[in-house]
Amino acid sequence: MRVGIGLPNAIPGVDRDLLLEWARRADAGPFSSVALLDRLVYDAVEPFSALSAAAAVTERVRLATMIAIGPLRNTALLAKQVASVGTLAGGAHRITLGLAVGARHDDYEAAGVEHAGRGARLSEQLAYLRGGRGKQVHAECDGVELLVGGASGPAFARMARYADGYAHGGGPPRAFAAAAVRARAAWNDLGRDGDPTLWGQAYFTLGDADRGAAYLRDYYAFTGGFAERIAAGNLTSARAVKDLIRGYEAEGCDELVLLPTVADVDDIDRLAEVIA
Amino acid sequence: MKVSIVGAGPAGLYLGILLKKADPAHEVEIVERNAPDATFGWGVVFSGETLGALRDADLPTYIEITDTFARWDTVDIRYRGRLLRSRGHAFSGIARRQLLAILQRRCQELGVKLEFGVEIDDPESVSGDLVVAADGANSLFRRHYADRFGSTVEPQGCKYVWFGTELVLDAFRFIFTETEHGLFQVHSYPFDESTSTFIVECAEPVWRRAGLDQMSEKESLEFCQHLFAEDLGVHRLLSNKSIWLDFLRVSNRTWHHGNVVLLGDAAHTAHFSIGSGTKLAMEDAIVLANACVRHTDVRKALVDYELERQPAVERVQRAADESAGHFARVVHSTHMAPQQFAANLLTRSGRISHAGLAVRDPEFTRALDAWFARDSGASPTAQFAPPPLFAPLRLGSTTIGNRVVVAGRGTDLAAAARTGSGLVTTGMVAVSPDGRIWPDSPVLTDESSIAEWRSAVAGAHEAGALAMIRLGHAGRRGATEPRHRGVDVPLRAGGWPLISASAIPYGPYAPAPTAMDGDDFSRVLDAFASAAGRAAEAGFDALELDAAHGYLLASFVSALANRRDDEYGGSLANRLRFPLEVLAAVRDRWPDDKLLAVRLSVADWARGGVDADDGIEVARAMAAGRAQLIHVEAGQTVAGGMPEYRRGYLTTLSDRVRNEARVPTLVGGYLTTLDEVNTSVVTGRADLCLLDLSPTDSVEEVAV
């Protein structure tokens, strides 16, 4: 199992210096990827802008969205953005595009996009990115690794139909294992060969645990009571990180992304030490 | 901490005990609307695993409870004049009244304040650092905060009534009795030295036909007394406000709101047929009490409680759902031999598999496997036999060596056969060039394609398996990129005209197909029949006609894809017309002594499409059209379906098709273990299983 690290693009107040330093240290560290989140109605840096910046200062790590909310975006422009990040990164092979419908209504409202029908629109975008019937302006997204996230049956079907793998939304290893079974079953149902690539994610801070928890409560405030549960799952010790890594590895996770909850570059070094 | 608990059932009382024990400084008050000795229901059941948790949580009540336990390890099944016994199922039961008395005494001893006969009208009037709603399945608190909790309450399963009886059983006993009105079943178990619980259950239409909807409490008791006279003997059924009920399945998205928390039945119910309501309630209390010890902040404790309990409870609820479904459909299993009927019953919730049964009761399982071997004709006098998957299957003149089917890759069938499977299948082989899914789809469109398949079949035969070809026409799912680029991705360039029942594109960017016209019908019919002839020439032992997953024949079956207004569209009979014509044409051309199967999506998993009831009709029609085997599939009729994936996600559908349409079935649905195959076939849920063999790293070559 590979381990990647999140970029703090969705932590309020993050600036240029921190983002670039974060990306550089991740590239120099034992991480396979840098990945980020997407949230419109929040103090967050837009994911493809953040990935472009990361692309410019990294050589090695894979650049991933975990996930980007596809339906908020115009499909042709999304494809162009993804392809452009690939160009800036030195090739589409460095890009993993995780897409899902997201969980927040207000992002859709703000973007002026209907919330209803979001699943069908995501399928359409995926078909487009796959080059369906030559609709793409150029075949510029060929070579990009596509992941689909979501927990519904249709999300798994969409994943198996169009993507290379599954982007899990987080939780204990047991929750990941249940999702992995569903992903493999869907893959099989759609007649795909082999197995889907499985990406997992978890939140961590090895610094200020209270700040991390406060951030998660704020970021997930829209979920009501679930924010507390997510905050309770934050990995705040080396032991907790190691246990989670071991658990995910045992369940067949291919790449686990550890997402920051405190925008402190020292957390990268602390994490690097734990996973080294 | 001041704790207010509403409801003095097992959950509320036990939580009171544990909190007070953890810290005597806690001020714990329990209010209950009923009197201390009011009882609803008779006995409650516990399984072996719960007891360890109770011992660790509070030893004095554990000792008292287990001292009064009725214990048994046998499940009896009375069915068709036989009594089947299966051992190794550790259970214990206790009178609910007795359990409550023990817990009440312990509360008093510890200084938990108990108040009976107090009705709470306004949940917001209850104060405390922690407010616990342990007020049962009909919880006032849950209803008051229904939006916050995200509550779902819905009836589940059959009509049921909860009696007691002085008939003392030495086992958990299920009784199945056929009447002129339909099937009745009983769940009964002892709970002390003089009394047993006796739950009578039947499907709603049966209940109405029997007139039970019109009967008084006394009349319905007399009805049941009479119905089960043979089992009850001189013993009377006892009523305790015993009226017929619907079981209400309760679930909540979240179990706490602020400092109010749901406990036990208020938070969740699980169908009584797996007997775990009280167990879950007391486990809730243990986990909540422990969380309160770990955290001084109540809200953190409630988050922990929910994080720990929700997944565990959901698993039990899923098992209970399966069990409730089993009893709702059990009338369709009454054609089964008693051994199989019993095995089907014991494995109903999915928690006990064939292997689990063998651990619990090796003798029962040996007898079951031996019966299966005798029934399959393998060894007419067997008293022991290999695991069920090794039993042969006879279908017409075809005998398949075992119950495992493995899919080949392309024209390589030998590798699949070498796994040991009795039957290997191809992927879809197109009957005409325009029926291909992607440009390099395998075909059987002319004489030149026979040779390659002939050697494929020979490879399978050499490895000891029979070979089945899946003949199909992609219909509107044709002209796509190869599957490593995704599924249903329309070809970037090139392609060919598509046909379907109606001119509706399958998915995004897919070209619109042409609705089939008169010439197309005869051309497609001929293509299928000719391909069947070629398949026979190539030496295939079995042929499955692909009428699943939204391909051409499937597009006729579903109203979601078929909008025709001629004799091939409209009613289900009309929509089946063309697939049945193709089946007839293939049957004519395909040798009589060879196996003919149909692969069907028996449910579309999409609104307005084919549901399982329709699917069973379709399977029946195919069987009447001389299909000998139904390969049960579901979904993919339209690109935007709503599948529910999990391990064995097609098994229940296969069970329904096999036992309601009474036709042998082949089922996949992500079956990866031999135990799943053994369980499915021996319990009569399927006849053949498509096994997905995953690579194993259990043996690795090491350099010496």
Image (cartoon, rainbow, N blue to C red):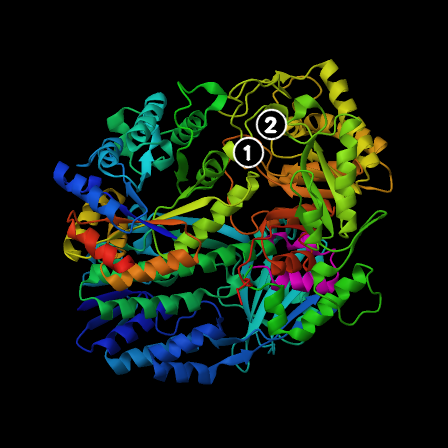
The crowding category of the residue bearing disc 1, from other C-alpha atoms within 10 Å (few below 14, some 14 to 19, many at least 20), is some
Amino acid beneath label 2: Trp
Classify mark 2: helix, strand or loop: loop
Pointer 2 and pointer 1: residues touching (CB < 8 Å)? yes
Where residue A155 appears, x then y in whole percent?
A: 44, 38
Question: Residue A28, position in %: x, y?
Answer: 24, 47
Tell me the subunit letter for badge 2: B
Q: Residue at x 78, y 27 (%)?
A: B448
Residue A73 picture quarter: top left
Label for residue B605? none
Residue at numbered disc 1 = B483
Work out which quarter of the rendered image holds the N terminus of chain B and state it: bottom left
Q: CA distance from mark 2 to mark 1?
A: 8 Å
Residue B114, quarter of picture: bottom left
Frontmost residue, B100 versus A266: A266
Q: Vertically, is B342 above or below A213?
A: below
The residue where tag 2 is placed is: B438
